[in-house]
Amino acid sequence: SQQGEEDPQALSIQEGENATMNCSYKTSINNLQWYRQNSGRGLVHLILIRSNEREKHSGRLRVTLDTSKKSSSLLITASRAADTASYFCATFTGGGNKLTFGTGTQLKVEL
Amino acid sequence: EPEVTQTPSHQVTQMGQEVILRCVPISNHLYFYWYRQILGQKVEFLVSFYNNEISEKSEIFDDQFSVERPDGSNFTLKIRSTKLEDSAMYFCASSPTGGGEKLFFGSGTQLSVL
């Protein structure tokens, strides 16, 4: 499998519910980031968590990182219709500048 | 808020033609990137650029591709002889520092090769 794979591929929830997306990766990382992409638009950075951190919060976002399992999760609490977008994890492994993006989770929040 | 701008938003070209995609990164940023996304698929790294030279490139970034920072503000991606499989959304990104810090993306150029 590839560095950075999200699951589920697609998620549909009702407004007000929580949405959880997962990301798994293969190699050791320096940091892991989550980005959001509205349909046909560029990616917007949401949150960065470093390899020595286990949990991070930003507003309604909560990110966890488990380096022993090589996995991360993004939780969006009290979702809104405006949260409808694709969410990508991206990993930085060091020794360069590139971020490697995962396959993305398409989130749909219905009214 | 400063943003990365890309032009054009859409580009249609014939197979074999050269295209230049343009980007204006955020003014005090030092690291520049091109990524591409084929419809519905993952975002793929093409190249990173720092201090007027390529710092890293992917297998996709073959001899048909080149990047340039012709002046203090623009950052361009040139595809010399386009192929059908080059059809994708191309994103420019920049960051003030390297080392895997967050990237600021433009809205993309949708390239269609006919």
Image (spheres, helix red, strand yellow):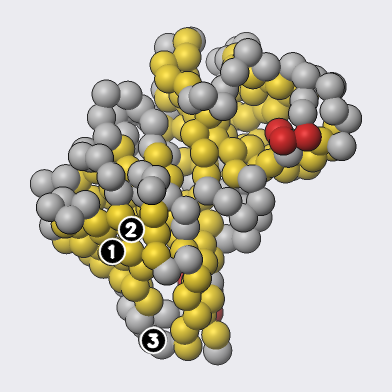
Upstream in the sequence, badge 2 or badge 1? 2
Q: Do the residues labelled 3 and 1 touch (CB within 8 Å)?
A: no
- For the residues marked 3 and 2, what is the alpha-carbon distance in whole angstroms? 20 Å
| Residue A60 spot, x, y in % from top left | 32, 72
Numbered disc 1: secondary structure = strand
| Mark 1 nearby-residue class (10 Å; few <14, some 14–19, many ≥20) | many
Q: Are marks 2 and 1 in contact (CB under 8 Å)?
A: yes
In the depicted view, which residue is nearer to us: A70 or A12?
A70
- Numbered badge on residue A23: 2
- In terms of image quadrants, where is residue A26? top left
| Mark 2 nearby-residue class (10 Å; few <14, some 14–19, many ≥20) | many
On whether disc 3 and disc 2 are found on a single subunit, the reply is: yes
Chain label for disc 3: A
Compared across the picture, whether A59 is left or right of A55 comes to: right
Mark 1 sits on what residue? Answer: A73
Chain label for disc 1: A
Mark 3 sits on what residue? Answer: A17
Q: What residue type is labelled 2?
A: Cys
| Residue B76 spot, x, y in % from top left | 64, 22
Upstream in the sequence, badge 3 or badge 1? 3
Upstream in the sequence, badge 3 or badge 2? 3
Tell me what residue is drawn at x 85 percent, y 28 percent.
B15
Tell me what residue is drawn at x 52 percent, y 39 percent.
B44
On whether disc 2 and disc 1 are found on a single subunit, the reply is: yes
Chain label for disc 2: A
In the depicted view, which residue is nearer to us: B91 or B14?
B14
Mark in the foreground, 3 or 2: 2
Tell me what residue is drawn at x 43 percent, y 12 percent.
B51
| Mark 3 nearby-residue class (10 Å; few <14, some 14–19, many ≥20) | some
Q: Which amino acid does label 1 sit on?
A: Ser
| Residue B72 spot, x, y in % from top left | 56, 15
Numbered disc 3: secondary structure = loop
